[in-house]
Image (spheres, rainbow, N blue to C red):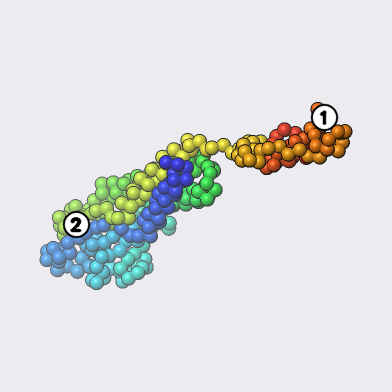
Amino acid sequence: MGLLESYFVTLLLTVAAAVLIAVSFGTDRWFDYTIDRIAIKAATADTKINKSPIYFTRYRGLFRICIADGTDADFLVESPYKEIATGGVCYYEQGYELTPMESSINLGSSYEIRKHVMRLQVAALAVSLFCTIVIAGLLMYSTLLKRKKYENIKLIVGLAAVVFSAGAMGCCHGIMYLENNKIAGADYPTDWQTDPLLKGNFKMSLGYSYIIVWVAVGLLAVAELLMLNTACIKEKPEKNRKEWAMDATHTIAPSVMAPTMLPNTMYTGSGYEYPAYGSHHLVPYIEGMPTRGSQIGLIPNESLYYR
């Protein structure tokens, strides 16, 4: 694969990765919680199943949790969800706790760890997206120039994008572990296992927002390998002035290589003859050749001429 082809493929992979990471930010399908409400309604007539989101099929993103069917989701119009409701069937994720909440004081140290891991996940994804955009810009610049440029910077930033995006997914798995095994509370799966209404009637799965980030991690890893390969490609060195002049001399057609004698009025004898040895005034002139000595690298002084 040549230099330009490598740049073009790497640019496509990087742009695709940036789009996928951006989509994961804006969608609410990191985790899917599927609840069998028909079975729950058949098991009880208690209206509490309309007062809590844990009894509804819902989709969870980085910043919002959305109810799949909110027709009887009475909790969305009541406190505390009324204050954080958005879009009619969604409410904002409160796990980041930019302002402390009284309801989470007694949830233990695992909840505090989860809070910081959630913040770290969003920060890592943001950094990886920024790095990916920077790489795409540098690759586009190199592609337009058709030459290698800023290779070391691209390699370092590309490695950072891979590390931060993979680290964000590691944080995601840490959040799942804490919620499923460590945090005890009505809003977390640890207690759902013992809820008679939810036991056997709920299922948690990973959504497409989660999956596309892993795809982006893979694309960034392949792009990093391609950038490493590109950095090892040796460019054809540019020719200096002397080499270009010599090439131009060698490509002159034989028909114009016959020397043309210039008038020599400084010496006695015929008007057309070679100058005396050591003279820099007149020499045989060949059509098509540069007339300045510095153009063919023979005379360093620009003031001396061959004609």
Residue 7 falls left or right of residue 297: left
Considering the image in quadrants, where does the C terminus appear?
top right
Contact between marks 2 and 1 (CB within 8 A): the answer is no
Percent coordinates x, y for residue 259 in the rendering = 71, 37
Residue with the mark numbered 1: 276
Residue 143 falls left or right of residue 211: right
Closer-to-camera residue (240/18):
240
Tag 1's secondary structure? loop
Percent coordinates x, y for residue 47 in the rendering = 19, 69
**Given this view, does label 2 or label 1 mark the residue nearer the observer?**
1
Considering the image in quadrants, where does the N terminus appear?
top left
Q: Is residue 181 visible?
A: yes
Crowdedness of circle 2 by 10 Å Cα count: few (<14), some, many (20+)? some
Question: Which amino acid type is shown beneath numbered disc 1?
Answer: Ala
Residue at 31% from the left image edge and 51% from the top image edge: 211
Closer-to-camera residue (268/3):
268
Question: Which amino acid type is shown beneath numbered disc 2?
Answer: Phe
